[in-house]
Amino acid sequence: MQESPSLVKFGAKLKQMLYYMFAPSGASFREYFTIKGSPKDVQALAAVVASEKKYMDSFLKNGLNDPVVLNSRYTLEKAVRSFEQETGIKWPLK
């Protein structure tokens, strides 16, 4: 199934945002991104991005089968479902 160009662009921007979140201390992605939408939509996006970062951090620190990582994955999946229900947009990072 072919993804729509806007969804592909959205996914690319999210990957770029996560890259900047892992950038060296002092780097900021604020100058590169503008997020627009209703407050609920922006909160849903922020929750998923924060969950993605927590999952990646715990995975890199503890490995895949650690209970902390599995809990982070569950939290991420819950945030993704909430984002998709709130916005009607499919989360492009799976």
Image (cartoon, rainbow, N blue to C red):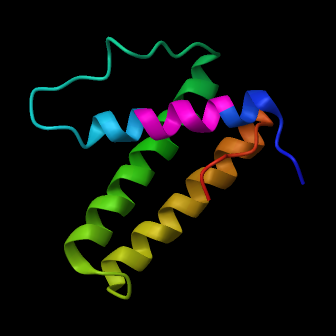
**Residue 38 at x, y = what percent?**
64, 16
Q: Quadrant of the N terminus?
A: bottom right
Above or below: residue 79 compared with residue 55: above
- 84 falls in the magenta region: no
Task: Look at 31% across and 23% down and name the residue there.
Answer: 29
| Residue most extreme to the bottom | 65
Q: Is residue 52 left or right of residue 86?
A: left
Residue for point 42% across, 74% down: 71
Where 38 falls versus 52 (above or below)? above
Quadrant housing the C terminus: bottom right
Q: Is residue 11 left or right of residue 49?
A: right
| Relative to 71, 42 lies left or right | right
Comparing 76 with 17, the one in front is 17
Residue at (30%, 34%) from the top-left corner? 20
Picture quadrant where residue 8 is located:
top right
56 displayed left or right of 12:
left
Residue 76 drawn at (x, y percent): 51, 59
Which one is nearer the viewer's eye here, 29 or 54? 29
Q: Nearer the viewer, residue 21 or 84?
A: 21
In the image as oriented, which residue stretches furthest toward the right?
1
Indicate whether residue 11 is drawn in magenta.
yes
Where is residue 5 shown, x and y percent of the image? 78, 30
| Above or below, 31 relative to 24 | above
Q: In x, y percent, where is residue 72?
A: 41, 67
* Displayed quadrant of residue 7: top right
The residue positioned farthest toward the left in the image shown: 25
Q: Which residue corresponds to the image point at 66% horizontal and 48% vertical from the top-left?
A: 82
Q: What is the magenta range?
A: 9-16
Considering the whole magenta stretch, tell me its main secondary structure: helix
Residue 61, by quadrant, is bottom left
